Amino acid sequence: MEASATLPSEEMARAAYNALAFLPARSMVKTARVEVSSAGLRFTGTNGYAIGQDVCPVEDYIGPEGGLTVHVDRSVLADLDSAGRKDKKGFGRFELKPHDGLIFRPGNNDVPATGQDVSAQADDRLWEMLDSLFTRLERKTPALPELVAFDAALLAMFSKVKAPKVKTGDANLDRCLDMYVYNSKEPILVKIGPSFRGVIMPIDRDVHEENVGPDGLW
């Protein structure tokens, strides 16, 4: 069984890059998830403490109604990003086959980007937990506590996210990082632009104070 779709190369590159930003080389999670369906091409990356997920629109989708999924290592995301950016304003064909891999054929007829399916290395329980986490957080009612602590390195991952700029007259403005905060200990849902969403785990202030003392906390 396999699936394929035509898609805007630069938007595919941006979605792959945004997922890659959350899968650093030293991540305890070694694979990213790639899903294609009529709803779009979705990339998800995580280091276990923060999640980045972005979607690229597709056209002429051919495949199962529910879509198909593979897992790839971070080098594949980098290759897709590079191939998509080189195919400026072009449309490429994306093909995915579970247990085999994926291939992106850019519209400029440049060398295709390929990747092997490494789903055997993926932790199915982890990915099920990530999916349920998004669902649970989206159903909550936001509430803003007085204090929330973050690991600055995790927060910095979101500064790498690329999103379409907002045109206002002669100026182009960057998208903001929008947070759904429930309390100081729950994972926090993040949205940047029209298609990127993520999650960041705040630091437990009580545990932090026990470990390193109150210095640095309000």
Image (spheres, grey):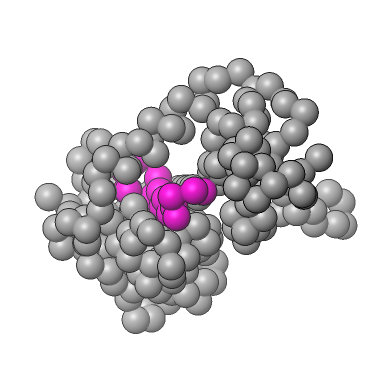
Residue at the limit of the structure toward the bottom, as seen here: 111
Q: Is residue 208 magenta?
A: no
Q: Residue at x 31, y 37 (%)?
A: 128
> Does 35 sit left or right of 56 as displayed?
left
Q: Residue at x 55, y 42 (%)?
A: 201
Measured from the top left, where is residue 131 in percent x and y?
38, 35
Give the quadrant of residue 121.
bottom left
Q: Residue at x 50, y 76 (%)?
A: 86
Magenta span dominant secondary structure:
strand
Q: Nearer the viewer, residue 167 or 76?
A: 76
Q: How many marks?
A: 0
Question: Range of the magenta residues?
Answer: 35-50
Which quarter of the rendered picture does the C terminus lie within? top right
> Does 158 sit left or right of 172 as displayed?
left
Is residue 140 depicted above or below 120 in this figure?
A: above
Q: Nearer the viewer, residue 184 or 40?
A: 184
Measured from the top left, where is residue 50 in percent x and y?
51, 48
Q: Nearer the viewer, residue 136 or 104?
A: 136
